[in-house]
Image (cartoon, helix red, strand yellow):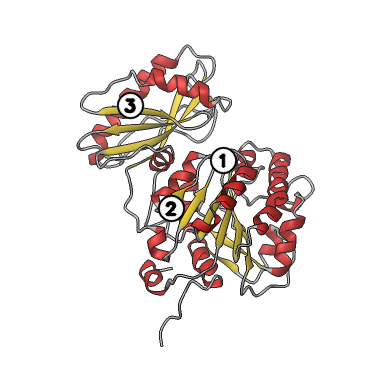
Amino acid sequence: MDLDLIRRLSQPADTKVVLCVLDGLGGLQGPRGRTELEEANTRNLDRLAEGGCLGRTLPVGYGITPGSGPGHIALFGYDPLVYEIGRGALEGTGIGFELGPNDIAARGNLCDINAEGLVTDRRAGRLSTEVTTGVCEQLRQITLPGVEVFVEPVQDQRFVLVLRGEGLSDALTETDPQREGVSPIVATATSPEGERTAALVREWVEKARAMLGGRERGNGVLLRGWSGRPNMPPFPELWKLRAAAVTVYPMYRGVAKLCGMDSIEGAHTLDEQIALMKQHWDDYDFFFLHYKYTDTAGEDGDFRRKQEAISAFDDAVPALLALKPNVLVVTGDHSTPASMAAHSFHPVPLLLWGDLVRSDHVHQFSETNCAHGELGTFPAKEVMPLAFAHAGRLAKYGA
């Protein structure tokens, strides 16, 4: 959807919209020929499907595997090919680090590297946040010529590396190979502007490896998603409403805040997220609820655990409905099939329920049924216009 058109057509209304993003929701057939979603107990979501309509989204385009950043940016109505946000900016903003005009940031993972220099575990066994915080205190001792260096813990094995100085560029490669059994990538410039920055990153990585080399777990670092702070039209201004994000993981808080949403913080479980939504229900018109555990299980290649995570979300649907939203959207930012243990290019199931919905002939929330739903397969950037139109928040176009 064209954002200038949204500015013209969006209108205030006394309606509430909830977007529930089950991270990595889409899957592939498992041992019994059914996906994780199809194997899950989804009695409540299926009940919504009976009165709602189904479809599938393409986060970026046919055959394109999206990262979490583009996947969410698209769901919020922005073209991810126009508004490209690196993981570093998302993670940094998510933990409250204010990126300045001379900052570039990368999302970091503590990882395990063997004596041959190969990555054996990209997440170092998912180290606890407390351990990573201690490692970050060590890494802050590393200095680089001509720049300030910030190392901030995020959650589990994740951290943020920020370089601050004149003339820095995000035109450099990531060091994370995104798989095990290979060496980390050596940072190189992707344009002449990035040469100095790439040299600084190589120096920092070398010093970090020397500092952490004696550790049993988390003896290496992987960096990806180099970026500065993007310039995006604020979501609340575009849609003429009050918007809030209720997340557990900082990265998803970051993408919402970069889009101009408020962040309601303090939740550590899905039940606590819904309780916070209830507490702030009168303060906002739009709520973005993020649910991470489907993606975590998918990336771990754990079909059963992903199935169980979907079932656990389904158990919470009555509490969401008790809030009485006018429109409820349930979808994912991308697919993460357990059989691939990674993000994939497959279309993502979507359920739209609420006011003015024209129900279709399919009544179970699954990949197969979503392929035959009323909404068809469409770009994820059109989800918000659909949701807000059903909530009476888009005016007529033309005479």
Q: Position of residue 391 (x, y in %)?
A: 55, 70
Q: Can you tell which of label 3 and label 2 is closer to the viewer?
A: 2
Q: Position of residue 90 (x, y in %)?
A: 42, 43
Q: Is residue 266 left or right of residue 323?
A: left
| In-front residue for pair 16/304 | 16
Q: Real-space Cα distance between discs 2 and 1?
A: 17 Å
Q: Can you tell which of label 1 and label 3 is closer to the viewer?
A: 1
Q: Mark 2 falls on what kind of element?
A: loop
Q: Mark 3 falls on what kind of element?
A: helix
Q: Residues within 10 Å of mark 1 (few under 14, many from 20)?
A: some
- Outermost residue, top direction? 214
State whether residue 6 is above or below residue 231: below
Question: How many circles with numbers are drawn on the protein?
Answer: 3
Q: Quadrant of the N terminus?
A: bottom left
Q: Is residue 168 left or right of residue 59?
A: left
State whether residue 359 is above or below residue 243: below
Q: Quadrant of the C terminus?
A: bottom left
For the point 26% across and 28% down, the residue is 148
Mark 2 or mark 1: name the one nearer the start of the chain. Answer: 2
- Outermost residue, bottom direction? 399
Q: Real-space Cα distance between discs 1 and 3?
A: 37 Å
Q: Real-space Cα distance between discs 3 and 2?
A: 35 Å
Q: Which residue is mark 1?
A: 267
Q: Residues within 10 Å of mark 2 (few under 14, many from 20)?
A: many
**Identity of the amino acid at label 2?**
Met
Q: Which residue is mark 2?
A: 261
State whether residue 191 is above or below residue 47: above
- Label number found at residue 202: 3
**Identity of the amino acid at label 3?**
Arg
